[in-house]
């Protein structure tokens, strides 16, 4: 096993860490899909209001990627389809009849055709661009990270200790379909080290070591826009393994819910598409920010929505509107900071609480070198950001934009004293590269 | 109550089309008095407590020892003060230094505000440091009108025409000083700054004594503690080192720049020491330690060279940048017959070279990346 040690990074100390308890959420009366929240797809609907659907029956597909189907996770009736501006599909609501009848047109023989038809393809994503890959692409390799390190991430070591067999099934399926290298990354001491058909790599537990982009950078860096790797989460790998080996349709998802905005932080097992309101059995009217995904890289959402398609973390963070008198002058024993500018550094940020307060106003980039202190890749972050802002495509390529993903820069944005939206700028840069390709 | 007043004023400003463009002024006062509570709009949704205000205020904090000692020293060095006890000297110093600060902040602040209103962006905290630095780099006898002109030059030509803090090539405070240095040289160095208005007794700085082939009348420890004439903030190496300590433990000043500037000094002065027999230039004989405590070397190294914007911005570049400063400062001091002091020019010179260093560092990074892709 090849071992890598990431030295630059930070594990955020947030309050409200989810316990290991697994809470089974009962099947909701309705499930919700949000096609417009999926990056980079043009939705073409396959159902209309009033249609009846089964578990695994297709709901919509991407016009640019027409063989990739998105399917229902429950059986019932399409209750409502809500369009937004320019007729983008914002919400598909399906009334759940709770009978869990599986779509009969699914073939369980392992092949790419059946994989596409199964509705499981969208769980794959590609680097560069962090999007659902085109069905015609054969990746150079596939990455599976059993060690997400973002705040409130699922702990797969304990969650999946009884699912080793399903994981192996998933690996074998992917190997058969794509016939490429499969790279499996885990912590140094791991229950997954006996899996076969994969290359094992290990990283230390320091965020962003768990990010696929960072792992690829250290294992086998992406050279250009056509040098494509696939990746998927461990629980989606299990989903694929189970689909091809069992009769049921694997339509449940583990979600890790944390943050100081709620009380019952734990792992929740839910039907895919369950709204946040239906998952959490507590008062959500308080002044909290609901984030689908982790606090470093998620997206703001509302309690009526379900989680975004690939997310397995839900973060509930308190808002903080207090304004401190002469805050810049105070010693700052309770200011959470990775810099050494506050006395909280001496306390190792103990007792400091993070909120959604930006803690400052946007300024021009002042290169204090803070970004580099949390940059886990050999990337000149400040120059890359400047080349993106200057729309200098040639320079972006030279500085390695294809290796970058917004989430790999979220700590840079976190620590930036000028409050530069580093992740957002990287995302914009990747959009520019993609539109140029 | 104050909070309510500020909110009310803000509402009035924002609701009036004509007043709207003056919002940056209100914002500057508002965020000065109260920390902001803006909510994050993009991921990450939680942010570090550090902001530019805190960063800049820590630099000002680091400057305070030099400020206090400098103010005291103005009184100590002035022939007008007969009774040399601490309080008398300090109060006399305040009478000279405070008007300097008032002028710099009034004039500089005004121009900062004008540019912020024109550009419609918030007032940047960078001027807090620039404004605090400018009087400390000036001889205490500089006429106030000159200080005002220099400040305007530093802010406008040194910074704003490039786009404001973050875009400037040269250190704005040094640009201000360089302006006076070339426009009114007799006020900035030579004998004039230290001729007392009443009895005409002149006091020369140690560097001037040495370059004029006189014996230095101050001991090394006097120079280290700062009991010597010179610009307001530059004399006490001890006070400056306390500031350096603050900058280093808070991680705000670059240790690479400070260390490499020192290395440049040691290398160059040792080299020139070898030439003492060859030439009768008295400056060649100065040791590295003497150079360090004389003139503006320590002040420039700790507070000017480390300016993150005008210094090299890559870590490798910072090494070369610092070495160049140390080298140039000593070369100008020793070999140039016209100026006994070289730190200011050395830093401005290195400021101009910093982008070049960064360019080479980036090119080598890009080359390394391409090579690793080809493997």
Image (cartoon, helix red, strand yellow):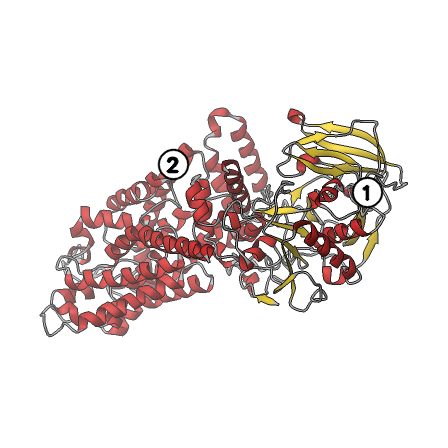
The label shown at residue B280 is none
In the picture, measured across the screen, residue B238 lies left or right of residue A288, that is: left
Front-most of A398 and B342? A398
Q: Is residue B20 left or right of residue A184?
A: left
Residue indicated by mark 1? A278
Q: Give the side of residue A343 with respect to residue A232, left or right.
A: left
Q: Position of residue B145 (x, y in %)?
A: 25, 43
Chain bearing tag 1 is: A
Q: Residue at x 41, y 37 (%)?
A: B116
Do the dots labelled 2 and 1 sit on one chain?
A: no
- Where's residue A303, x and y in %? 75, 40
Q: Residue at x 30, y 68 (%)?
A: B263
Q: Quadrant of the N terminus of chain B?
A: top right
- Callout 2: residue from which chain? B
Q: Secondary structure at mark 1?
A: helix
Determine which residue is flagged by label 2: B115
Toward the viewer: A106 or A316? A106
């Amino acid at each position: 096993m090849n071992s890598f040690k990431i030295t630059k990074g930070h594990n955020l100390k947030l309050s409200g860490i989810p316990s290991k308890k697994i809470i089974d959420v009962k099947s909701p009366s309705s499930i919700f899909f949000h096609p417009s929240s999926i990056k980079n797809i043009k939705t073409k609907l396959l159902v209309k209001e009033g249609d009846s659907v089964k578990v695994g029956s297709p709901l919509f597909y991407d016009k640019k990627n027409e063989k990739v189907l998105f399917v229902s996770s429950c059986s019932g009736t399409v209750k409502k389809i809500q369009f937004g501006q320019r007729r983008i599909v914002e919400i598909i609501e399906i009334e759940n009849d709770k009978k869990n009848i599986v779509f009969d047109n699914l073939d369980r023989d392992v092949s790419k055709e059946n994989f596409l038809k199964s509705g499981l393809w969208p769980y794959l994503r590609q680097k560069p661009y962090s999007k659902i890959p085109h069905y015609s692409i054969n990746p150079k390799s596939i990455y599976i990270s059993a060690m997400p390190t973002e705040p409130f991430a699922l702990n797969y070591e304990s969650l999946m200790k009884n699912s080793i067999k399903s994981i192996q099934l998933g690996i074998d399926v992917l190997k058969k379909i794509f016939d490429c290298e499969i790279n499996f990354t885990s912590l140094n001491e791991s229950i997954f080290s006996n899996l076969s058909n994969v290359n094992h790599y290990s990283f230390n537990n320091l965020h962003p070591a768990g990010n696929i982009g960072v792992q690829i950078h250290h294992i086998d860096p992406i050279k250009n826009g056509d040098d494509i790797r696939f990746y998927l989460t461990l629980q989606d790998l299990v989903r694929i393994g189970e689909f091809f080996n069992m009769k049921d349709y694997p339509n449940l998802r583990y979600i890790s819910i944390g943050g100081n905005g709620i009380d019952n932080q734990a792992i929740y097992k839910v039907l895919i598409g369950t709204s946040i309101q239906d998952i959490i059995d507590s008062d959500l009217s308080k002044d909290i920010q609901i984030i689908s995904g982790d606090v470093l890289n998620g997206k703001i959402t509302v309690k009526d929505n379900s989680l975004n398609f690939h997310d397995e973390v839900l973060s509930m963070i308190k808002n903080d509107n207090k304004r401190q008198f002469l805050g810049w002058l105070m010693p700052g024993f309770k200011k959470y900071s990775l810099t050494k500018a506050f006395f909280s550094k001496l306390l190792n940020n103990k007792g400091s609480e993070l909120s959604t307060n930006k803690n400052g106003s946007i300024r021009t980039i002042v290169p204090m070198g803070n970004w580099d202190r949390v940059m886990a890749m050999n990337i000149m972050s400040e120059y890359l950001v400047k080349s993106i802002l200057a729309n200098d495509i040639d320079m972006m390529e030279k500085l390695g934009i294809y290796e970058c993903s917004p989430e790999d820069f979220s700590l840079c944005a976190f620590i930036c004293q000028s409050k530069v939206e580093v992740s957002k700028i990287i995302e914009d840069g990747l959009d520019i590269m993609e539109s140029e390709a | 109550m104050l909070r309510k007043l500020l909110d009310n004023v803000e509402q009035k400003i924002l609701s009036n089309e004509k007043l709207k463009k003056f919002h940056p002024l209100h914002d500057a006062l508002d965020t000065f008095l109260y920390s902001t509570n803006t909510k994050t709009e993009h991921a990450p949704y939680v942010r570090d407590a550090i902001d530019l205000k805190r960063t800049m205020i820590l630099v000002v904090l680091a400057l305070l020892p030099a400020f206090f000692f400098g103010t005291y020293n103005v009184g100590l060095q002035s022939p007008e003060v007969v009774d040399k006890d601490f309080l008398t000297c300090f109060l006399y110093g305040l009478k000279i230094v405070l008007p300097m600060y008032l002028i710099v902040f009034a004039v500089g602040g005004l121009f900062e505000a004008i540019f912020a209103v024109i550009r419609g962006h918030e007032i940047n905290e960078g001027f807090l440091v620039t404004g605090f630095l400018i009087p400390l780099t000036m001889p205490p006898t500089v006429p106030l009108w000159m200080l005002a002109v220099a400040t305007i030059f530093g802010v406008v030509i040194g910074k704003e025409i490039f786009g404001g803090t973050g875009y400037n090539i040269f250190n704005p405070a040094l640009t201000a000083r360089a302006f006076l240095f070339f426009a009114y040289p007799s006020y900035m160095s030579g004998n004039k700054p230290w001729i007392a208005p009443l009895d005409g007794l002149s006091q020369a700085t140690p560097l001037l004594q040495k370059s004029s082939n006189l014996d230095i009348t101050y001991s090394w420890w006097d120079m280290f503690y700062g009991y010597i004439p010179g610009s307001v903030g530059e004399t006490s190496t001890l006070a400056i080192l306390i500031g350096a300590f603050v900058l280093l433990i808070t991680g705000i000043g670059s240790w690479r720049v400070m260390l490499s500037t020192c290395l440049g000094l040691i290398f160059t002065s040792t080299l020139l020491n070898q030439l003492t027999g060859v030439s009768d230039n008295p400056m060649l004989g100065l040791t590295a330690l003497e150079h360090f405590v004389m003139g503006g070397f320590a002040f420039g190294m700790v507070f000017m060279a480390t300016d993150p914007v005008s210094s090299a911005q890559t870590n490798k570049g910072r090494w070369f940048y610092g070495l160049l400063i140390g080298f140039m400062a000593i070369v100008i001091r020793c070999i140039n017959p016209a100026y006994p002091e070289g730190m200011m020019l050395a830093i401005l010179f290195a400021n101009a070279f910093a982008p070049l260093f960064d360019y080479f560092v980036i090119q080598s990074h890009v080359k390394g990346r391409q090579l690793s892709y080809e493997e």
